[in-house]
Image: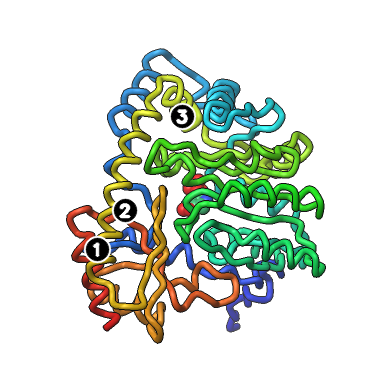
């Protein structure tokens, strides 16, 4: 008797039909291409990875017979790492999260997933920036929410425009923003807009999801505007990551939220991964307590600053009229607007054939816009190849 193959499609859960796409997998695939001059992934430069110190810490844990690093951890996180992280947040943001406000996650992406799981029903509205981080669009779409995009300009989210839309009846549950050195725009939210934004959240009763993935990577030591969470811990959940400041192989981040929300995030985490990896938590704790993270950060910021300057100089040198990039003050990205008539998807494909990786702008919009732009990430490209990569890209626009 012939057995027909099961029709898996008919068994997949309805929520998977929201089709989150495979954008992240596409970007990660660039990592594996040998010889590519890649401005594609928003990845830290492996030069910054603290190999020797990580190895020494591991040896130390083994030598002293430490148990906690090798065991399961409490769902919220191990006490020591939570304390070290809370102290660090206090030193950077002038406010210490209470014990029932802070949670250690498996990367910032898990924090976003936990927020989605906790708040979103089918059809709920989430406001995002246009453009925004692809992983967030995918995470929120996975809960069948309606994504509404509000534009950004050189000073970050256009809060005036958000206010107009709220006045016309927009009713979001969540607003997701990356205020510092935004991915993919490279822009930073102005201090005045931060104050207005948190007031809007209070007035209209939505939760701000603040992603601080690149905040610690400012190129200069000047004061950054205050975080949204430090301004308004009553209406903000902050998601952070150690991927850009320590190393992403750890998959470690955090979420700070009002206690009532934080408790729900902990509940949601019980049936994702139960707890973030204890080994990574202990490495992070020691790395922070010994001041090593500050040393790594000083080097990372100088490295990314040089790369950014080289990228902007190459753009000025090679790009045809009509192409212009944003001027980041930190982070990994500049957002390049293309000359009229240049299609970003086509450009990215032709660039890949010429050995240059860029990500077409469309991946950063929830609604297919963005075909007039590409994201250039200068973080991982070899410094000596920046000029050549930009020159090749520019040649393809002529
Ligand atoms: C804005 C933003 N948030 C979150 C993440 C993901 O962080 P993690 O590696 O901690 O999941 C990224 C990584 O590219 C990012 O750009």
Q: Are marks 3 and 2 in contact (CB under 8 Å)?
A: no
Quadrant assignment, res 340: bottom left
Residue, x 60% and y 30% (percent of image)? 77
State which mark lies toward you, 1 or 3: 1
Q: Is disc 1 surrounded by few (<14), some (14 to 19) or many (20+) residues within 10 Å?
A: some
Residue placed under numbered mark 1 in the picture: 314
Q: Is 13 situated above or below 9?
A: above
Residue placed under numbered mark 2 in the picture: 308
Q: Is disc 2 surrounded by few (<14), some (14 to 19) or many (20+) residues within 10 Å?
A: many
Query: 310 and 23: which one is in front?
Result: 310
Left-right relation of 92 to 258: left
Residue, x 55% and y 42% (percent of image)? 225
Q: What is the secondary structure assignment of the residue under circle 2? A: helix
Residue 238 locus on image (x, y percent) = 62, 42
Residue 353 locus on image (x, y percent) = 26, 76
Quadrant assignment, res 87: top right
Residue, x 41% and y 48% (percent of image)? 330
Left-right relation of 211 to 282: right
User: Which label was assigned to residue 85?
Assistant: none
Residue placed under numbered mark 3 in the picture: 284
Q: Are marks 1 and 2 in contact (CB under 8 Å)?
A: no
Q: Which tag, 1 or 3, sits closer to the chain's start?
A: 3
Q: Which tag, 3 or 2, sits closer to the chain's start?
A: 3
Q: Is 139 situated above or below 89?
A: below
State which mark lies toward you, 3 or 2: 2
Quadrant assignment, res 7: bottom right
Query: 388 and 158: which one is in front?
Result: 158
Residue 111 locus on image (x, y percent) = 61, 46
Query: 287 and 220: which one is in front?
Result: 220
Q: In this figure, which colouring scheme has been used for the structure?
A: rainbow
Q: What is the secondary structure assignment of the residue under circle 1? A: helix
Q: Which tag, 1 or 2, sits closer to the chain's start?
A: 2
């Amino acid at each position: 008797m012939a057995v027909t193959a099961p029709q898996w499609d008919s068994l997949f859960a309805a929520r998977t039909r929201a089709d989150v796409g495979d954008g992240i997998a596409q970007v990660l695939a660039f990592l594996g291409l040998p010889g590519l001059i890649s401005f594609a992934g928003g990845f830290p430069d492996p030069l910054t990875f603290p190999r020797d110190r990580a190895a020494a810490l591991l040896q130390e844990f083994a030598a002293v017979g430490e148990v906690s690093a090798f065991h399961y951890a409490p769902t919220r996180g191990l006490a020591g790492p939570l304390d070290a992280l809370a102290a660090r947040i206090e030193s950077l943001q002038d406010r210490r999260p209470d014990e029932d406000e802070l949670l250690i996650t498996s990367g910032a992406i898990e924090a976003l997933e936990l927020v989605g799981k906790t708040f979103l029903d089918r059809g709920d509205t989430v406001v995002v920036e246009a453009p925004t981080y692809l992983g967030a669009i995918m995470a929120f779409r996975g809960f069948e929410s309606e994504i509404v995009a509000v534009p950004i300009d050189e000073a970050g989210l256009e809060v005036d425009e958000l206010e107009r839309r709220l006045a016309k009846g927009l009713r979001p549950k969540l607003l997701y923003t990356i205020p510092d050195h935004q991915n993919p725009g490279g822009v930073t939210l102005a201090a005045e807009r931060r104050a207005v934004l948190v007031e809007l959240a209070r007035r209209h009763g939505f939760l701000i999801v603040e992603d601080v993935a690149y905040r610690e990577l400012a190129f200069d030591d000047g004061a950054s505007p205050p975080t949204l969470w430090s301004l308004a811990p009553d209406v903000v959940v902050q998601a952070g990551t150690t991927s850009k400041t320590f190393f992403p192989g750890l998959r470690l981040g955090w979420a700070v939220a009002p206690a009532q929300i934080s408790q729900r995030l902990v509940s949601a985490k019980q049936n994702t991964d139960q707890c973030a990896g204890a080994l990574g938590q202990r490495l992070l704790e020691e790395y922070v307590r010994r001041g090593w993270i500050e040393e790594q950060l000083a080097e990372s910021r100088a490295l990314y600053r040089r790369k950014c300057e080289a990228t902007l100089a190459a753009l000025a040198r090679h790009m045809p009229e009509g192409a212009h990039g944003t001027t980041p003050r930190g982070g990994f990205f500049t957002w390049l607007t293309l000359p009229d008539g240049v299609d970003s998807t086509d450009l990215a494909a032709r660039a890949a054939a010429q050995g240059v990786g860029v990500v077409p702008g469309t991946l950063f919009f929830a609604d297919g816009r963005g075909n007039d732009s590409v994201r250039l990430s200068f973080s991982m490209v070899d410094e000596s190849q920046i000029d050549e990569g930009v020159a090749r890209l520019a040649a393809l626009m002529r």
